[in-house]
Image: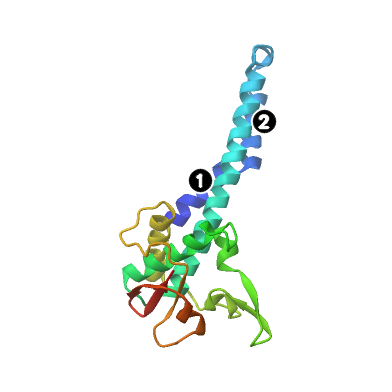
Amino acid sequence: MLNILLMRIRYKLDPGVLLRNLRFFCQTRDLSHWLFGGGFILIMGTIGFFIVSSIAGSEISRELNCLTLNIYHEARGEPTAGKYAVGRVTLNRVNSRHYPDTICEVVYQKRWDTIRKRYVGAFSWTEIGRPPTLEPKAWEQAIKIAEDVYYQRLPYQVGQALFYHADHIRPSWARKKTRVAKIGRHIFYN
């Protein structure tokens, strides 16, 4: 339902749709007095506003989608607090000078692994060829959590944690980090 609503809003704010509607409006009315009275500036300013809003809205939508995907794939089987924590770590990385500046860039970031002699993803799910089919109930929950995290409506915080791993592995980098929380099967670090 939310996706359908967002699609309708994006359609109505699409620059092509706005221009078609403006053209129809102008063809069906005598606008000569508008053109000389400053209406042209008003119309062009409105078009510019809607174009900028459309671009900004689509960028937010893209960023929210990347955050949702990361929460879904990284923490689908975790308790709700663990899902919020994974989302928070993702945003903490965006806010850190050591990571890219957008959520999508953080989620899909690759780095060279000297041991494996290949590029590896920051999040394990980004390395698999094709993610599994989405489970509707878990996906809807991931959307809600992503929106809460993105808009800072967080019921649980992990501080400025930038790292986490599953509790059944012992990565060497974890020895050099400060543990801040264990939630579900994830351990979080600064």
Q: Nearer the viewer, residue 48 or 157?
A: 157
| Number of numbered discs | 2
Q: Nearer the viewer, residue 141 or 19?
A: 141
Which residue occupies 53% across, 74% down? 123
Which residue occupies 60% across, 61% down? 100
Figure check: 177 above or below 61: below
Graded by Cα atoms within 10 Å as few (under 14), some (14 to 19) or many (20 or more), the crowding at tag 1 reads few
Figure check: 107 above or below 172: above
Rendered-image quadrant of the C terminus: bottom left
Amino acid type of disc 2?
Arg
> Which of labels 1 and 2 is toward the front?
1
Mark 1 and mark 2 lie on one chain; the one further toward the N terminus is 1
Any part of residue 1 in sight:
no
SS for callout 2? helix
The answer to which image quadrant residue 120 occupies is bottom right
Left or right, 36 with respect to 152, comes to: right
The answer to which image quadrant residue 19 occupies is top right
SS for callout 1? helix
Graded by Cα atoms within 10 Å as few (under 14), some (14 to 19) or many (20 or more), the crowding at tag 2 reads few
Q: Which residue is mark 2?
A: 23
Figure check: 170 above or below 36: below
Which residue occupies 44% across, 70% down? 72
Which residue occupies 43% across, 66% down? 161
Q: Which residue is mark 1?
A: 9
Figure check: 76 above or below 2: below
Rendered-image quadrant of the N terminus: bottom left
- Image coordinates of residue 148 in percent, x first then y, are 38, 56
- Image coordinates of residue 86 in percent, x first then y, are 42, 68
- Image coordinates of residue 160 in percent, x first then y, are 42, 62
Mark 1 and 2 residues: CB-CB less than 8 Å, in contact? no
Amino acid type of disc 1?
Ile
